[in-house]
Image: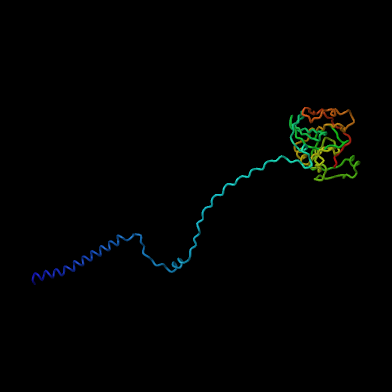
Amino acid sequence: MSKRAKRRKVETIALPMAARVGIGAVAVAALGYGLLGAPGNVQPVRKPSAPQAKASSTPVYVAPQVHAAAPAPPPVPTPAPLVEPPKADAEIPGALVRQVVDYASRQTPGTVIIDTNNTFLYLVLSDTQAMRYGIGVGREGFAWSGEQTVARKAEWPDWRPPAEMVSRQPYLPRFMAGGPGNPLGARAMYLGETEYRIHGTNKPETIGKRVSSGCIRLTNEDVVDLYERVKVGAKVIVLPTNAGRRPSQGAPDAASRSPDPASPSNRPSATSAQVPSPGPRIAEVQ
């Protein structure tokens, strides 16, 4: 074989080999580019199973977003109601309403002084002040003056009219249990061994008047207040009226010449009243 023929044969063999090498290089380059450019987190797509596909078709309820409510404003405190002064009973004049007044006295605090003329009862609080109550007092012929002590106290007391009263008023009950209908009212303070009492009444319109048989009456509200303040053994001074009924027939009552204690310059003392002697006992009746 000639040299030219051999050279052509080699070229014919070499061309296909070079083409193969080139194609291989291109394939390798393409494969490397695909590997380098693909994202690393790509997962192969899987076909969902039948239960999963069915579940995915069921509508899902999504609750609306709930926003936290704004905190309620703190409650505004309601102002306390103004404390009103005690109102006078419609049946009682203003001067007879219970009140603290200026009252000069040398008596021990807790002493009760009854001003029959002016229908006032004073409970001594100090040398210069007293609690004043409007009262009803004995009618004409039944007023009295003197000094006693509170022997005992009772709440909603029973009432037993004495024989002298029954003889004058035969229609009176012989006994009446304590209660709102009882003429002695809510409280009673018994004076010494007499039948005289400081007590309440179920007829407040009689306060400031001379209607009793010698007892001293207050409204039920006032007598409850006085009852809580006065102690058993407290001194009670009943000042005389201009024509007072003396409980005894002895010497003239020195207290009848005493000046009116309602004036701050005049001060009743323990010696300005006489103790009533045991005699006819008079009880209160409406």
Give how far across and how far down residue 2 sits, in percent. Answer: 8, 71
Give 197 or 4, whichever is nearer the viewer. Answer: 4
Residue name at image x 57 percent, y 48 percent: 73
Q: Quadrant of the C terminus?
A: top right
Give how far across and how far down residue 80 sits, in percent. Answer: 65, 43
Side of 142 relative to 77 (left or right)? right
Q: How is the image coloured?
A: rainbow
Residue name at image x 9 percent, y 70 percent: 4
| Residue at the left extreme of this rendering | 2
Q: Quadrant of the N terminus?
A: bottom left
Give 77 or 56, whichever is nearer the viewer. Answer: 77
Give how far across and how far down residue 49 sits, in percent. Answer: 42, 68
Residue 202: which quarter of the image?
top right
Side of 252 relative to 17 (left or right)? right
| Residue at the bottom extreme of this rendering | 1
Numbered disc total: 0
Residue 277 seen in render: no
Residue 186: which quarter of the image?
top right
Give how far across and how far down residue 61 sits, in percent. Answer: 50, 62
Residue 2 seen in render: yes
Image: 280 above or below 12: above
